[in-house]
Every structure is written in structure tokens, then in C-alpha cells.
Image (cartoon, grey):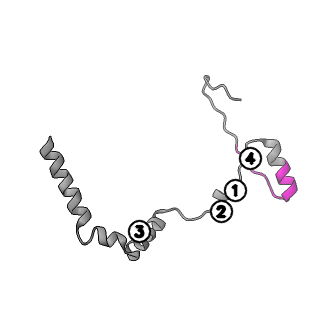
């Protein structure tokens, strides 16, 4: 078990201390490339995701009237007899 731990520790240490390891992680180019990869993985900004959802129908109606915008009512009926809400 100790030999396996030493082997894994050596592998991790060699990966971290190689030229493409520690010194590469310190360069701004490395971090900008990581940021570009993260940005590419994120979903695009969608307008409908920025909508403030109201959970109360009356609050939604009030906001709709104030902003003079239509309202979208999304209703879900839970068929689970054990559900306590609604």
C-alpha cells in the first residue's frame, strides 16, 4: 500500500513539476486559454433565462399591468397523491 501511495505521489509530483506543468500554469496565456475554454462550454445568454419568474399569480398580474406586457401562465398539476402543496 505504501509503495502504491509513493508511486502515485511521484506521478502527481512529476506532472506538476514538468515544464508544461508549474511554469505553464503561471503564465497569463495559460489562464486566458482556460478562460476561453470555459466560455466556450457555457451556454449562450438567452433572454428568456433572464425573466424574473413570479410564483404568485397576483404578483404576476400586477407586474403585467404595470409594465403593459402580456403574461404567460405556466401551470403544472402534480398527480402525486402524496403531494401536500396545492
Q: Decide whether residue 8 is among the magenta residues.
A: no
Image quarter of residue 57: top right
In screen coordinates, is 32 left or right of 17? right
Q: Which residue is mark 1?
A: 51
In screen coordinates, is 62 left or right of 84? right
N-term-proximal mark, 1 vs 3: 3
Name the disc covering residue 34, or none.
3
The residue depicted at 66 percent of the width and 34 percent of the height is: 77
Q: Which residue is mark 4?
A: 54
Q: Cα distance, mark 1 to mark 3? A: 30 Å
N-term-proximal mark, 4 vs 3: 3
Name the disc covering residue 47, or none.
2
- Answer whether labels 1 and 2 touch (C-beta < 8 Å): yes
The residue depicted at 22 percent of the width and 68 percent of the height is: 18
In screen coordinates, is 36 left or right of 86? left
Image quarter of residue 81: top right
Q: Which residues are magenta?
A: 62-74
Residue 77 against residue 43 in the figure, above or below: above
**In terms of depth relative to the viewer, which is nearer, 62 or 25?**
25
Q: Report crowding for label 1: few under 14, some 14 to 19, many 20 or more residues within 10 A (C-alpha).
A: few
- Answer whether labels 1 and 3 touch (C-beta < 8 Å): no
Q: Dot 1: what SS? A: loop
Q: Cα distance, mark 2 to mark 3? A: 26 Å
Q: Position of residue 83 (x, y in %)?
A: 63, 26
Q: Quadrant of the N terminus?
A: top left
Amino acid at each position: 500500500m505504501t509503495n502504491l501511495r509513493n508511486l502515485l505521489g511521484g506521478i502527481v509530483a512529476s506532472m506538476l513539476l514538468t515544464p508544461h506543468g508549474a511554469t505553464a500554469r503561471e503564465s497569463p496565456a495559460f489562464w486566458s486559454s482556460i478562460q476561453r475554454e470555459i466560455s466556450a462550454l457555457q451556454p449562450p445568454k438567452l433572454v428568456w433565462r433572464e425573466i424574473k419568474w413570479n410564483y404568485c399569480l397576483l404578483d404576476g398580474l400586477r407586474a403585467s399591468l404595470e409594465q403593459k406586457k402580456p403574461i404567460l401562465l405556466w401551470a403544472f398539476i402534480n398527480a402525486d397523491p402524496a403531494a401536500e402543496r396545492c
